[in-house]
Amino acid sequence: MRDLHCHILPGVDDGSPDLDTSLRMLEAAKAAGITSITCTPHCRKPYFNGEDDFKRMWEAFYDLEDAADGFPLQMGFEVNYRKLMELGIEWAEVLHFDNSNEFLLELSVGSRSSRYDDYERTIFELQGMGYEVIIAHPERYTAIQKDIGLAEELVRMGCKLQCSTDFIAGGRLGAERRPAIKMLKEGLVSYFASDAHNVKHYEYFERANRKFGHLLIG
């Protein structure tokens, strides 16, 4: 079972602060039944501002890989839409999942817009470049909490939706449980991910997968 979104890399964002914590998170992931991990540090302010941060995050990946005793790890990024627009769409060529065409895109959590026109153009451009766009934690987006039809629109556009499993405990922002369950019941969610920033988040992954994993559409 793959965890395709987590902040397990040491010292690069608001996730694991050091290698010891990363290794404890890895053990918790194994205990939750996870058999491979895509490491996805934040590509957004204040953690990612360009080439130096890109190199720093890859160095952290190599440090964890060296200490992980062969556990399957993959490098990727959680790419914030605004940061991608700031960097330029050509950065997608190095921000997608390594050795994969998957691209994890974070939209604007607080956006209340009833239309996703700007996102739509970028998503279609990414798809035209050959990437499979995965939308990170749609249950957190205010617009989707107000109108689940926007999640349906993203799926019709060819995106896959990834719920972060802390929704089982209410979510990072406190309002994610209801929209996550609604999307699951309507057959819109392809992936669960821990979005782990600490050891406890893997407990949420195990609980959510046990209770709702059968509703994922794959």
Image (spheres, grey):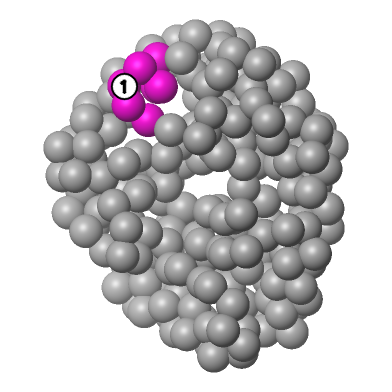
Q: Quadrant of residue 207?
A: top right
Comparing 161 with 90, the one in front is: 161
Task: Note whether 116 is above or below 14 in the view shown.
Answer: above
Kindly identify the residue that appears in the image at 42 percent across and 62 percent down. 76
In the picture, measured across the screen, residue 81 lies left or right of residue 86, that is right
Q: Which residues are magenta?
A: 153-159
Q: Quadrant of residue 81?
A: top left
Q: Is residue 171 above or below residue 51?
A: above
Position of residue 215 in the picture relative to residue 90 (left or right): right
Identify the residue at image location x=56%, y=39%.
191
- Residue at position x 72%, y 64% from top? 29
Q: How many marks?
A: 1
Q: Which residue is mark 1?
A: 157
Report helix, strand or loop for mark 1: loop
Q: Is residue 115 magenta?
A: no
Place of residue 58 in the rendered image (x, y in percent of width and height, measured from the top left): 42, 78
Q: Judge whether residue 155 is colored magenta.
A: yes
Report the amino acid beneath label 1: Met
Which class describes the residues within 10 Å of circle 1: few (<14), some (14-19), or many (20+)? some
* Residue drawn at the location 45% of the way across and 75% of the way down: 57
**Where residue 163 appears, x then y in whole percent?**
61, 36
Say if residue 109 shows up in the picture.
no
